[in-house]
Image (cartoon, helix red, strand yellow):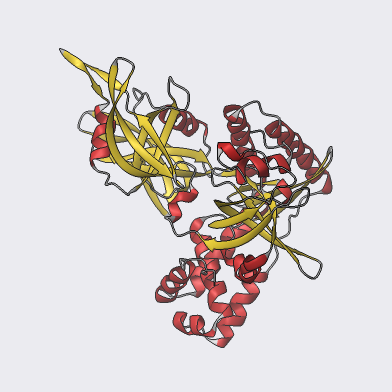
């Protein structure tokens, strides 16, 4: 669905979808209620009593605005700790007005399900597809079940058999595990073909250093060198013979990277060494409130305000490296709670010192003319992304925006890196570990 489509339509189609027999409500009927798992984007109060939440589908897309009502109002105060997390909501159609959320609960499933590619593995089965017997992987996501056929491959002197690489990976996965899959549409409507499957791994953030090779006997395996948590890692690139589309895309992107670019990646053990599984330049378009978007990258956040045909663009510094976010989150816990401060071992003078560092504002020292030119470029990029014909075109534009974000973020990058270097220097090894533990605390439960 196109991002610029009417938000109300998106709300109806993505959040309030009901079973086929209930696709349209008559005005005289009582409003239907449905339960959905959604991603909480933000909260907002209007006036004295009106409270709203903005949510988006877990798979991504524009956010929608829901009026908090009934029992859900009791949960509103604790929602700020769950921004960016999955929650369960009960929604009642609001007729011509804003749709209402009447109940809110914390999502009790795996946090990994925030990833659009994450599914629960439910085992394998055999199904007759045309004249072939196919092995299928059974997958579930938020109560919806799908079966993905494993492609058959030629076997010398025998009948075609399921892809041995995929079968071997599935042997190492247990029923109930969270997996990350790549699917393509099958030959029949609503069917899927399994392209890749692996145990879910959280993406890591690394700084590109160079392309290199790994020596294995007489072989030289192409590789990429990334700095991750201040340590260099050499990771093999996928084999050029791989039929997996993501492998070719990762190799192509690796060749375009410049030293200092930050990337998000996942890797897996393959043929005795760590091999790149997924790679993208760090930067993505994310939904905000009122159905709008912002572009977030390692050291910058580009916020869009859309007023009809006019687009305003604003640039803000951002600490986007995961370890930086962990340290900042943990310190803020410690600075706002005396028991956490004692746990870390912060003295009163340290508390004041850390507060000043965290609250210091970063300003760009560039000329107004430069920022005006940048805003024009980013406005054009947003319009192109918004008007993209399909996901592939949109992904290409998003990658170009990510490279541009890496360039413009130099306005703040050195200051942000210096800020966290100072914070880590002021904490001893034990304190830093405790701060990171605090930063890993799960979001507050809904009471």
Judge by depth and name the residue closer to the eye, 147 or 432: 147
Residue 287 seen in render: yes
Image check: 337 left or right of 46? Answer: left
Which image quarter is the N terminus in?
A: top right
Q: Write the residue at 52% across / 36% down.
A: 257
Q: Is residue 168 above or below residue 293?
A: above
Residue 85 seen in render: no
Judge by depth and name the residue closer to the eye, 254 or 82: 82
Which image quarter is the C terminus in?
A: bottom right
The location of residue 223, given as percent across then percent down, is: 37, 35
Judge by depth and name the residue closer to the eye, 411 or 377: 377
Image check: 375 left or right of 68? Answer: right
The location of residue 198, given as percent across then percent down, is: 34, 40
Judge by depth and name the residue closer to the eye, 97 or 7: 97
The location of residue 240, given as percent across then percent down, is: 36, 24
- Residue 241 in which image quadrant: top left
Q: Write the residue at 29% across / 46% down.
A: 175
The location of residue 319, given as percent across then percent down, is: 59, 58
- Residue 82 in which image quadrant: bottom right
Q: Residue furthest front?
A: 28
Q: Is residue 164 above or below residue 83?
A: above
Image check: 215 left or right of 243? Answer: left
- Residue 125 in which image quadrant: top left
**Number of numbered discs on residues:** 0
Image check: 254 left or right of 241? Answer: right
Q: Residue furthest top?
A: 157
């Amino acid at each position: 669905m196109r991002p610029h489509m009417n938000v109300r339509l998106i709300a109806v189609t993505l959040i309030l979808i009901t079973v086929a027999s209930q696709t349209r409500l008559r005005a005289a009927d009582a409003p239907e209620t449905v339960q959905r798992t959604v991603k909480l984007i933000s909260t907002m109060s209007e006036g004295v009593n009106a409270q709203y939440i903005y949510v988006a589908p877990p798979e991504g897309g524009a956010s929608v605005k829901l009026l908090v009502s009934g029992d859900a109002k009791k949960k509103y105060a604790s929602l700020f700790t769950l921004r960016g997390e999955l929650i369960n909501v009960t929604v009642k159609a609001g007729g011509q007005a804003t749709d209402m959320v009447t109940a809110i609960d914390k999502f009790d499933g795996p946090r990994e399900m925030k990833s659009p590619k994450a599914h629960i593995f439910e085992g394998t089965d055999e199904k007759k597809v045309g004249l072939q017997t196919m092995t299928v992987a059974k997958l579930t996501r938020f109560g919806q079940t799908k079966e993905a056929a494993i492609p058959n491959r030629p076997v010398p002197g025998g009948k075609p058999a399921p892809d041995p690489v995929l079968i071997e990976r599935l042997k190492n996965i247990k029923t109930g595990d969270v997996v990350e899959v790549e699917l393509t549409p099958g030959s029949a409507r609503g069917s899927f073909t399994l392209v890749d499957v692996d145990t879910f791994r959280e993406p890591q953030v690394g700084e590109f250093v160079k392309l290199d090779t790994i020596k294995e006997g007489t072989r030289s395996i192409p590789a990429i060198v990334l700095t991750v948590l201040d340590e260099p890692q050499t990771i093999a690139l996928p084999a050029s013979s791989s039929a997996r589309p993501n492998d070719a895309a990762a190799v192509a992107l690796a060749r375009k990277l410049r030293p200092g670019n930050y990337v998000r990646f996942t890797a897996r053990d393959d043929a005795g060494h760590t091999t790149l599984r997924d790679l993208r330049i760090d930067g993505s378009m994310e939904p905000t409130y009122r159905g709008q978007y912002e572009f977030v990258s390692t050291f910058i956040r580009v916020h869009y305000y859309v007023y009809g045909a006019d687009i305003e663009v604003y640039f803000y510094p951002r600490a986007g490296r995961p370890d930086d976010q962990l340290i900042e989150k943990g310190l803020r816990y410690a600075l706002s709670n005396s028991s956490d401060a004692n746990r870390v071992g912060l003295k009163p003078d340290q508390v004041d010192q850390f507060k000043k560092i965290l609250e210091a504002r970063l300003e760009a020292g560039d000329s107004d003319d430069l920022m005006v030119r940048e805003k024009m470029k980013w406005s054009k990029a947003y319009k192109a992304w918004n008007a993209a014909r399909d996901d592939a075109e949109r992904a290409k534009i998003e990658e170009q925006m990510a490279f541009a974000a890496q360039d413009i973020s130099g306005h703040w990058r050195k200051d942000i890196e210096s800020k966290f270097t100072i914070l880590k220097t002021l904490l001893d090894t034990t304190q830093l570990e405790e701060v990171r533990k605090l930063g890993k605390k799960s979001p507050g439960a809904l009471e």
